[in-house]
Image: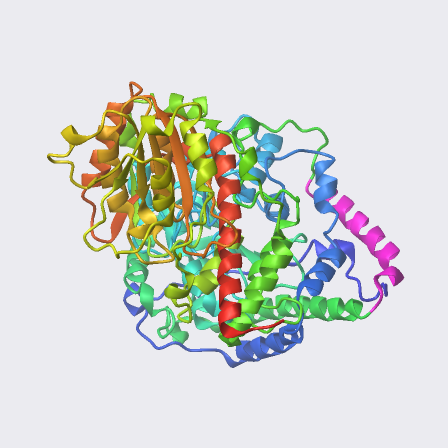
Amino acid sequence: MDSSIILNSDYCFEQKFTFLHQNDWILPSEHSIFKDTSWNLEALCQLKRELNATKSLLNDKGEQWQEHTARINKANKVISFIKQKIQPEILTGAWCKFYEILSNYPLCSQGTESFKSLHLCEAPGAFISALNSYLCCYYRSICWVWLANTLNPYYEDLNIKDVICDDRLLFPTLKYWFFGKDNTGDITNPNYSKDLQEFISEKEYFNLVTADGGVDCSDNPAEQETVVAKLHFAEMLVALQNLAPGGSFVLKKFTFFECVTICKMYFLNCIFREVHVFKPFTSKSGNSEVYVVCLGYIGVEKVRAYLEQMNQNYGSLTDKSMFPLKSIPSSFISQLIECCKLFSELQTKSIQENLRLYSIPFSEYESELIELQNACAEKYIQRCSIQSHLFIERLFPLKKQIFTSFHDKLNRNLRKLRFQVVGDIFENLSKPQSMFWPDVILDVERRLTVCFPLEKKRQLDDIEWYFVPKEIKSRMKSKSYQNWLLMGKKISLIQNSKFCNPMLLHLWNRISYNPEINIQNHQPTAFCYWDIDNISSLLIESSDAENNCLVSMAKLKDEEPTKDPALTKLKETFSKSFNYNFLNLENQEANFPEEKKIVYINSTVWINSLHQEILIKQILIDVLCNVIKVMKPGDSLIICIQTLLTRYTTGIIYMMLSLFEKFQCFLPSDLAPAFSGQMWILSNFQNPECTSRILSYFETVASFKVPEEMEILEIVPIPVLCGGHFYEYLLDLNNNHMHQRLRSLTSTEKHRLKISV
């Protein structure tokens, strides 16, 4: 490797710019905010064009380019070197970046007994972990209180391109995270800051606020700064409304070319004693990421009028300027241009060097590169003063960590998996935006095959009952169910789930919502896709079928007269069968048979949709309230449900399980259409002491009045639903089911369109 091209290792750690405050840097009147139309500076526009021209050289680069840049990254060895010294809760590139920032700037006050920090857009929690390690090293006696925000990884209507589902730190520290009253965690909601102040209860300010937010810009990489402008503006507003006088603010930024960013940088320079721009060594050199480090806040009381005006003009970022151009001194403009040139040149050189090395066999420079990476890692350890065997007081006990929705049996690189599923370029495939429907089908099928190869299915002959875990039964002994109920913004689309690999869910949504899909092509036929003989044998066990009575639900008023092949097959085994209206038990309870009952509820016939779960919430809870009322010890329950992806529906099944001795869930055969759901069988109703409380709670949920734009999202807390044997069982089940539905959908569409590969 040509040493003249490699930046000196010391210089790699000194990519900084400090604004030198001038006397004429004074805020204009708050009444001038967002009055003028947006403006631009030609010098910065030219820098933007030049940088985008360099970045455009990467337009045809895909997965191999990602691997190449990761391999030649000078900071490649830093994490492994840190692991030899200390063991933080979560050690990622973000941890390394923030520890580097902490080591370069005085963000923690000397001589104070307490320290409060607020971390915005924080998932997966690396900044918190880095700060914990730093405080354990230098401020061990300080009383540290922290609070964090991020897009809620448990809220189902968030695009996985935006949300970080890695909850290794978030799950065991959930009580320190605040997602707002809408439960989304979206700080671009103008009400978030108000919700936050109410949540804190007594008015208190934070000594440090960090904001590490970003937005997926793969659809428009040339306009990254504009795409993230709204988020960065929201981060600034929330931070400044909650930061203590004299406090520090660390904000991730990218470039400073646009009017909105220029104005924000001027605003920050006017209200902080010092403003620095820093590119950590551990930040990838080929991207635009930098951190703005602001020290010495003048306090919210002195800028409250400005913040109120900004909050009111939240939607004017694209067409109005925050400040008139004439109110920004030329001395600031010249310093900002100098700053932009510095970081644009650094990024351009890095991209050009990465491209040069891409054309050279790795073996030709491998040994020299490894030597450089080792030297840089040693330099990082030295400059950040990371001490060996430092005792770090953990943020949570290790036993509280759980498998995440990304849990992968093959232990694959999850970043690579995400790129293979979501990335715009995958081998030689075209970009999804320009694809015709047949190409979309083939693209999804190929991604599914590569990322989620088929596994051997379990045989029905081997299936036995699962006894309901003791942890579920003990949880239901709680007498505070009413405190479990959680409301939030209404869900219109299940884009994310804690109970299924979200990468599979992304592929499913990409095709199942396409207008080309005709649901008639994916509905069940008269054929039964279940091995009902085996299921029946499991149900009656050693008893006789004649001692059991099948009780099925009468058709709903709007239900289509579709045949239910599974019910038909069950009736062949259980000759005694009755229909009841479980939406209204009036005058029916006395007529229920005395024999042991098998109650059969098939919710998949209620609504004609491939996305039933969010549409059946009310009917399902109403029906199950009445089912509980008629159950007697020894009875069984069959619930057919299309999917079990939301906290709400999973909570219902979880609570129902506690009333029975054992359970099993069956997926349909591989030939089943995508419409088909899961068959949950709950056996031997126990009528435990908690039955009446669960029934009362279900009735409360069913009748609970919520604002029109809100709904009940959770009836059992997410920490209760996750972490045990039931969660592992459900995660595996849902992944298999989603995989099966995707295979069915793509196969049927290929056959319909006569696509051959």
Q: Residue 635, relative to residue 9: is it above or below?
A: above
Q: Position of residue 147 (x, y in %)?
A: 43, 39
Residue 369 in the magenta stretch? The answer is yes
Q: Please state the horizontal and vertical placement of residue 699, each as a whole percent of the image.
A: 21, 34
Residue bounds of the magenta highlight? 360-384
The percent coordinates of residue 594 (x first, y second) are: 23, 24
Q: Is 679 covered by the magenta stretch?
A: no
Name the main secondary structure of what is drawn in magenta. helix
Q: Nearer the viewer, residue 553 or 618?
A: 553
Quarter of the N terminus within the rendering: bottom right
Q: Quadrant of the C terminus?
A: bottom right
Is residue 146 in sight in this rendering?
no
Query: Looking at the image, which residue is at 64% across and 58% down?
Result: 450
List x then y, in percent, for residue 84: 74, 35
Model colouring: rainbow
The residue closer to the viewer here, 182 or 588, is 588
Instruction: Identify the residue at image location x=60%, y=53%.
Output: 452
